[in-house]
Image (tube, rainbow, N blue to C red):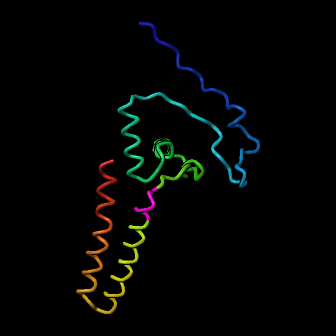
């Protein structure tokens, strides 16, 4: 049996060593290392589904998982890159549901049970179709 020696740790590269961090046009620090890995289509699809479920990009989801695994705190790495955009009709429906929930709060304050129940039913009617579409993606 031929045992392979364990490779020594690689020395830090210029990109990860001391010095100024790359920044965006706005002056915020940016992620400066591109890490590419190959994976099966099934794994890539599962990552994409899990990321969408959590409202993140696939890259941000993987970074967060890696941060948990290596027990490292990095706000820059934990931040999501490109946001996951919702269609305008979903944003409109969610906004309407939030307004309905505000009316529920007012109804509860006034001890108006039927109005509170009606507001909850309307909010539920707006949110459930959106949630059902997202669970089927």
User: Residue at coordinates 70% horizontally, 36% vertically from top-left?
Assistant: 15
Q: Residue reaching furthest front? A: 89
Q: Is residue 72 magenta?
A: no
Say left or right for 103 vs 5: left
User: Residue at coordinates 32% horizontally, 93% vertically from top-left?
Assistant: 110
Name the image quarter holding the N terminus: top left
Q: Is residue 75 above or below residue 104?
A: above
Q: Residue reaching furthest right? A: 19
Q: Is residue 99 above or below residue 5?
A: below
Magenta span dominant secondary structure: helix
User: Residue at coordinates 40% horizontally, 40% vertically from top-left?
Assistant: 47
Say left or right for 107 vs 36: left
Q: Is residue 88 magenta?
A: yes
Q: Tally the marks.
A: 0
Where is residue 55? Give x, y as percent: 43, 53
Say left or right for 48 vs 123: right
Where is residue 136? Give x, y as percent: 29, 49
In-front residue for pair 112/99: 99
Say left or right for 21 vs 65: right
Q: Is residue 36 above or below residue 21?
A: above
Where is residue 34? Give x, y as percent: 60, 35
Which contiguous range is marked in magenta? 86-91
Q: Residue reaching furthest bottom? A: 110
Where is residue 87? Give x, y as percent: 44, 57
In-front residue for pair 79/128: 128
User: Residue at coordinates 73% horizontally, 54% vertically from top-left?
Assistant: 27
């Amino acid at each position: 049996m031929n045992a392979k020696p364990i490779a020594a740790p690689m020395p830090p590269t210029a990109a990860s060593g001391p010095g100024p961090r790359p920044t965006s046009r706005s002056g915020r620090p940016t992620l400066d290392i591109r890490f590419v890995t190959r994976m099966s289509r099934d794994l890539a699809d599962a990552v994409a589904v899990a990321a969408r479920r959590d409202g993140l990009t696939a890259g941000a989801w993987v970074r967060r998982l890696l941060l948990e695994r290596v027990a490292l705190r990095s706000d820059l790495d934990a931040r999501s890159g490109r946001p996951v955009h919702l269609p305008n009709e979903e944003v409109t429906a969610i906004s309407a549901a939030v307004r309905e929930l505000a009316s529920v709060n007012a109804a509860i304050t006034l001890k108006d049970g039927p109005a509170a129940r009606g507001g909850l039913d309307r909010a539920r009617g707006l949110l459930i179709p959106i949630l059902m579409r997202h669970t089927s993606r």
